[in-house]
Each structure stands twice: as C-alpha cells, then as structure tokens.
Amino acid sequence: MAIYKEGKPISGYSAFVPVIKQGIPIPEARNETSIKVYEVALKMQIWDCIDVPYTRNPIAGNLSRATGYAFTQRKIGNILRIWRIE
C-alpha cells in the first residue's frame, strides 16, 4: 500500500496492514476483581472511598455507568482512590 503526500508517493514508508486471525477465543470481559469492586461500590455511601491497585482504566467512569452513582478517582502513589460523590 503506497502512502501519498501532496499527490506523490512517499518512498521508504511502510503502512501498517492488520493481519486477520481466526480461532482466537475472546477472554472474559470482567474478572473477579472488577466484580468485587462493583459489589463494594453498590454498598458505598456518599464520600466513602475505596483503594484499588492503580490502572490507567477509567474505573470511576465505568462504576458510574454500571451503578448509576457518581464517582471520582485520584492516583495516589501506586493506588487508585475512588470516592462516591453522589
């Protein structure tokens, strides 16, 4: 696949071409840790917080969608602290 700039092919540029793979099973979307966090979040009162191992995932946003409550999160060292705010 050629890449063009200003109507001319760019030499030496190789485009990423995805490879189709078959027979690879889909992993479970929710692991036991996420189920436990969800169950605890349902029991939280406003201004309660929980600590979970740090991850770049938007856990507070996911909990908000799943529970209907509002959450916010902050990274503190290697942990992620999540507060219920509504």
Image: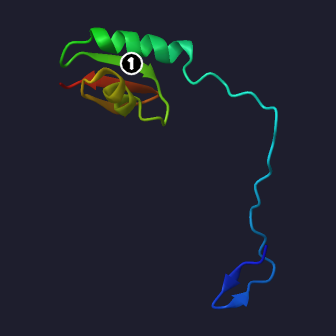
> Where residue 38 sits: x, y (%)?
40, 15
> Where residue 62 sits: x, y (%)?
39, 30
Q: Residue furthest bottom?
A: 7
Q: Identify the residue at image location x=42%, y=15%.
A: 37
Colour logic: rainbow
Residue 13 lies, with reference to residue 17, above or below; the image says: below
Q: Identify the residue at image location x=57%, y=24%.
A: 29
Q: With 84 as the anchor, is 12 left or right in this view?
A: right
Q: Identify the residue at image location x=67%, y=25%.
A: 27
> Where residue 76 sits: x, y (%)?
38, 30
Q: Residues within 10 Å of mark 1 (few under 14, many from 20)?
A: some
The residue wearing badge 1 is 51
In the picture, the quarter occupied by the N terminus is bottom right
Front residue (pair 11, 68): 68
> Where residue 9 sits: x, y (%)?
75, 86
Q: Quadrant of residue 36?
A: top left
| Label 1 residue SS | strand
How many marks on residues? 1
Q: Identify the residue at image location x=38%, y=18%.
A: 51
Q: With 1 as the anchor, is 36 left or right in this view?
A: left
Q: Quadrant of residue 15?
A: bottom right
In the picture, the quarter occupied by the C terminus is top left
What's the residue type where badge 1 is placed?
Answer: Asp
Q: With 47 as the anchor, is 81 left or right in this view?
A: right
